[in-house]
Image (spheres, rainbow, N blue to C red):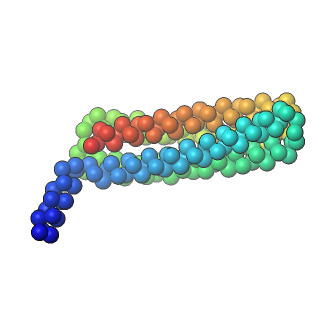
Amino acid sequence: MLKELLTVVLTKNNLNKNYMCINIAKNHRTNLYIAMAWISSAIILTTIALIANLAFWTAATAVVLMGFAFAGCLAARGNIWVQIGELPKLEECMHASKAKQECFNLFYRIRNTMRSTHILLIICCILTISAAAIAWLPLWGGIAIGAALAMMGVCLGMIIHLINLFIQLMNCLS
């Protein structure tokens, strides 16, 4: 009975030779959800900082909120940086399981998009810390905060695009 059950389980797992590759892609997708949460929290904090700056509440509020937003952008950037380092594992797995060429094309799109997203997140961090430095100025601080907010929106869009690409890759591999 146990031997038959084990045979069925092994046969079922061997039907999809890309099982490990799909798991690696799922881990990447999960990490992208975490990066999305970091950049989303940064967007919320930046929006509140912009309101604080433009409504003339207090300059200290905008500066502190932008500092926390910078931390969120930096966390998202670090998350993407770690994932770029782990992409060769996925590529090696795909080569070992002899994945379709269509899947490799998707993988290369993911790799290039992830590198672009990392560069955009670096720019986002620079804009955010610069906005934090001048957030105490009523007009110029608002402009800088708005620019940082726009770049965070672009980065969030890129992260969502990466999540969709990983979903397409998992569908291609299954």
In the visual, does 173 lie left or right of 7?
right
Residue at the image position 54 percent from the left and 33 percent from the top: 157
* Residue 88 visible somewhere in the drawing: no
Asked if residue 7 shows in the view, the reply is yes
Q: Residue 40 or 128: which is nearer the viewer?
A: 40
Image quadrant assignment for residue 62: top right
Q: Quadrant of the N terminus?
A: bottom left
Near-viewer residue (64 or 6): 6
Residue 150 image offset from top left, x and y in percent:
66, 31
Quadrant of the rendered image containing residue 8: bottom left
Residue at point 28%, 42% (across, down) = 173
Task: Give the tally of numbered discs.
Answer: 0
| Residue 129 spot, x, y in % from top left | 73, 43
Q: Nearer the viewer, residue 90 or 26?
A: 26
Residue sitting at x 23%, y 45%: 98
Percent across and percent down for residue 46 are: 72, 39
Most extreme residue toward the bottom is 2
Q: Quadrant of the C terminus?
A: top left
Residue 149 left/right relative to 113 = right
**How far from the left and from the top, in percent, is residue 114?**
48, 40
